């Protein structure tokens, strides 16, 4: 069994008008150039929701409220393992812009397969393409 470090991550699902915000990783970063759901590593003592609010402010200059958890994933890469919690977010203010990422895009459900994502995102991509309800306004299940 690998003893690689486990990185705890919060990733945001920010929907607006039937579209979902995705971000492209910086070219010189781990998995550079791939697309992902914006977010980042938890700091010591931080909840997933707190992490997500902080990371989206830092990466995209956007203010969000973290809502309910939609999914979680675990994936082992050769150099490290990740545990990702995917949370739906509500946009509060500031238009997202690529501050600490290469690019951003608002995509529809039928467009997700046009973007290369890291292997760790396979499960959430399946959830997103199969569950039309997530793409509607408001928190899931309400």
Image (tube, rainbow, N blue to C red):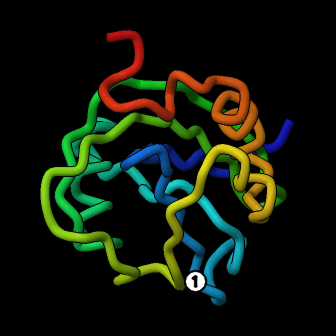
Image quarter hosting the N terminus:
top right
Horizontally, is 9 left or right of 114 in the view? Answer: left
Residue 8 place in picture, x, y as percent = 49, 44
- Assign a secondary structure to mark 1: loop
Residue 31 place in picture, x, y as percent = 72, 71
| Residue 46 seen | no
Residue 62 place in picture, x, y as percent = 23, 65
Q: Nearer the viewer, residue 35 or 94?
A: 94
Vertical position of residue 56 compared to residue 11: above or below: below
Name the residue beneath numbered marker 1: 26
Name the residue located 80 percent from the left edge and 50 percent from the top edge. 119
Name the residue located 60 percent from the left edge and 59 percent from the top edge. 36
Q: Nearer the viewer, residue 128 or 52?
A: 128
Image quarter hosting the C terminus:
top left
- Number of marks drawn: 1
Horizontally, is 139 left or right of 126 in the view? Answer: left
Occupied quadrant, residue 74 = top right
Horizontally, is 70 left or right of 131 in the view? Answer: left
| Residue 86 seen | yes
Name the residue located 49 percent from the left edge and 50 percent from the top edge. 19
Residue 89 place in picture, x, y as percent = 32, 41
Name the residue located 58 percent from the left edge and 58 percent from the top edge. 107
Occupied quadrant, residue 83 = top right
Vertical position of residue 54 compared to residue 28: above or below: above
């Amino acid at each position: 069994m690998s003893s690689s470090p486990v990185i705890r991550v919060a990733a945001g699902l920010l929907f607006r008008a039937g579209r979902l915000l995705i971000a492209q990783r910086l070219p010189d970063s781990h998995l550079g150039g791939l697309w992902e759901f914006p977010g980042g590593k938890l700091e010591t003592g931080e909840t997933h929701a707190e992490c997500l609010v902080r990371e989206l402010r830092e990466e995209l200059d956007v203010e969000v409220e973290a809502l309910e958890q939609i999914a979680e994933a675990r994936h082992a890469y050769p150099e490290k393992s990740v545990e990702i919690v995917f949370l739906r977010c509500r946009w509060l203010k500031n238009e997202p812009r690529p501050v600490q990422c290469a690019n951003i895009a608002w995509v529809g459900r039928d467009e997700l397969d046009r973007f290369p994502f890291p292997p760790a995102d396979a499960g959430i991509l399946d959830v997103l393409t199969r569950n039309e309800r997530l793409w509607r306004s408001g928190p899931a299940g309400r």
